[in-house]
Image (cartoon, coloured by chain):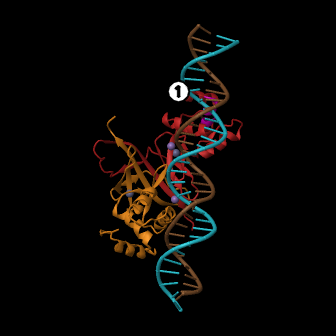
Chain colours: A orange, B red, C brown, D cyan
Amino acid sequence: MPEMKFTRDNLAEVLRNRGINPTHQRIEIAYAIFSRCEHSSADQILALVNDRASETSKATVYNTLNLFLEKKLIREVIVDPSKVFYDPNTDPHHHFYNTDTGELTDIDARDIRVTGLPPLPHGMATEGVDIIVRIRSKAA
Amino acid sequence: MPEMKFTRDNLAEVLRNRGINPTHQRIEIAYAIFSRCEHSSADQILALVNDRASETSKATVYNTLNLFLEKKLIREVIVDPSKVFYDPNTDPHHHFYNTDTGELTDIDARDIRVTGLPPLPHGMATEGVDIIVRIRSKAA
DNA sequence: GTCCTGATTAGACAGAGTCCAGAGCTTCGT
DNA sequence: ACGAAGCTCTGGACTCTGTCTAATCAGGAC
Ligand SMILES: [Mn+2]
Ligand SMILES: [Mn+2]
Ligand SMILES: [Zn+2]
Ligand SMILES: [Zn+2]
């Protein structure tokens, strides 16, 4: 995702480049995710998309999110036991997780080094390393 | 949890030491978690406890797991979007997560160093750092 | 226009987890 | 021993996230 205005036309092009047929609903969902560039739940995205006219169904939102995941247009963040967060940022990065508010903040992975990891079990390959720094307000 | 046989008597003592009234059900649940020292879901624990006689209800299993969490007798691991894993190991540690099988393996935190983390937002304190290394079988 | 294919939809469904109101236990005072 | 009080436990209803299905819809090729 290089710097660009997220117009619906631009997003249609982005979807096409990933081999995704840019339907009206898919463009609206992409718009919801990328214009508001935050970590959102399926529920929030459904609400955002339907605040405008569109009327997109829950099934389509889930189908589309899973399609976007598969095509690596977005990422999922597993940190809240009750729901998945969808992440428009696909660059390698980690997260601060505010356990009071549920807020997620990105941490660029470029400067991070993790040392001391044991060797992988035989025949296994690393798929990714996720670091979650749980934080909370210092005041009692 | 220092090395000890996890007899029901020992476990009753452990619960008492944490200020937990050691009822029959709580002891059975503790026994299921600590004797099989693996990462288990609530569902698995419910099944384990009821494979013997006991007949413990789902509500009691969840209540007890949340009580054990609160008293820091166990830990939760958030890694599968569909269920929480409960971890008898409360020493600082991280996890390998086999994305094919769902298997979790502990990584002792003593040798791990993470460098390059940005400063925390003002007024925030770190509550913990969780590292999840997602792995999968190398063979296609 | 018809035909074909893929996308969307409502609503049923499944699973994890919580809540509640009633019943069971235990402890304590008398 | 009895009863009251306070935990604890329980079935079952309920909520919420997410999936599935069968029907409908939209759009391109012809
Ligand atoms: Mn919980
Ligand atoms: Mn999913
Ligand atoms: Zn992120
Ligand atoms: Zn563990």
Q: Is residue B126 left or right of B68 when viewed as pictured? A: left
Residue at 61%, 29% in the rendered image: B23
Residue at 56%, 29% in the rendered image: B15
Q: Is residue B131 left or right of B58 when viewed as pictured? A: left
* Quadrant in which the C terminus of chain B is drawn: bottom right
Q: Nearer the viewer, residue A101 or B123?
A: A101
Q: Nearer the viewer, residue A61 or B139?
A: A61
- Counting from the top left corner in percent of width and height, residue B53 is at 72, 36
Q: Is residue D15 placed above or below A51 in the rendered structure?
A: above
**Secondary structure beneath disc 1?**
helix
Q: Is residue C11 placed above or below B33 in the rendered structure?
A: below
Overall secondary structure of the magenta section: helix
Q: Nearer the viewer, residue A80 or A130?
A: A80
* Residue that badge 1 annotates: B17
To which chain does the residue with label 1 belong? Answer: B
> Would residue B6 be seen by someone viewing this image from the given angle?
no
Q: Is residue A5 placed above or below B103 in the rendered structure?
A: below
- Counting from the top left corner in percent of width and height, residue A120 is at 51, 56
Q: Nearer the viewer, residue B46 or B117?
A: B46
User: Magenta stretch containing residue A70, yes or no?
Assistant: no
The residue range painted magenta reads B23-30
